[in-house]
Amino acid sequence: MWQKLMAILIIFGLFNSCNDDDGEDKCISTGIGYVTSVNSPTSGMVNETIDIDLDFIVIDGCGEFGEFIENQENNVLNITIEAKYEGCICTQDIPARKINYQFFPESAGDYELNFRSSPTEFITVNLSIN
C-alpha cells in the first residue's frame, strides 16, 4: 500500500514541478549524446557534401538531437553531439537515435573526423578528399 502511495506522490511531484509559474519551461535541458556507430565513406571530392550516418544514445526517452559541436584544428575535426531533453516525464530507457552528419570539405587532403563516443574516447573516420 505504501508503495502505491509513494508512486502517486512522486508522479504528483513530477507534474507539479512542471508548472510554468514564471514563464520559463523548467523541463528542458541539454547533455552529451555519445556516438555508438558510424557509417562513412573513406573518400570524397572537394566541395561535395559527404553524408555520414551516426547512431548515438541519450539518457532517457525525452532525449533527441540538439546540435553538433565542432572543434577543428587543421584537418582534424572533433565532433560532439549535444542532445536536447524536452519534457518533465520521460521513459527511463537509454534509447538509440540516428542522425546524419554532413561534412563539406573545401580543400583536398586527408581528414580525420573524431566523433565523441564517451567522455574520453572517439570513433575516428579517416577521409581522403580529392
Image (spheres, grey):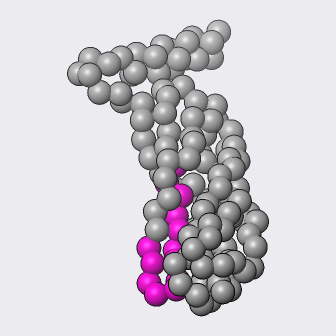
Q: Is residue 49 visible?
A: yes
Q: Quadrant of the C terminus?
A: bottom right
Exactly how many numbered labels are in the figure?
0
Picture coordinates of residue 38, whole percent (x, y): 72, 66
Residue at figure coordinates x 46%, y 62% from the top left = 69
Q: Is residue 77 magenta?
A: yes
99 above or below 47? Answer: above
In this rendering, position of residue 30 left or right of residue 24: right
In this rendering, position of residue 90 left or right of residue 123: left
Along the line of sight, which residue is nearer the eye, 58 or 124?
124
Magenta stretch?
Answer: 71-83
Q: Residue furthest bottom?
A: 109
Picture coordinates of residue 78, whole percent (x, y): 52, 74
25 above or below 9? Answer: below
126 above or below 48? Answer: below
Picture coordinates of residue 96, whole percent (x, y): 70, 48
Along the line of sight, which residue is nearer the eye, 47 or 102?
47
Q: Is residue 117 visible?
A: no
State the image quarter where residue 44 is shown: bottom right
Along the line of sight, which residue is nearer the eye, 130 or 5?
130
Residue at figure coordinates x 29%, y 27% from the top left = 24
Q: Main secondary structure of the magenta part?
A: strand
Q: Is residue 100 magenta?
A: no
State the image quarter where residue 42 is shown: bottom right
Residue at figure coordinates x 66%, y 73% from the top left = 123
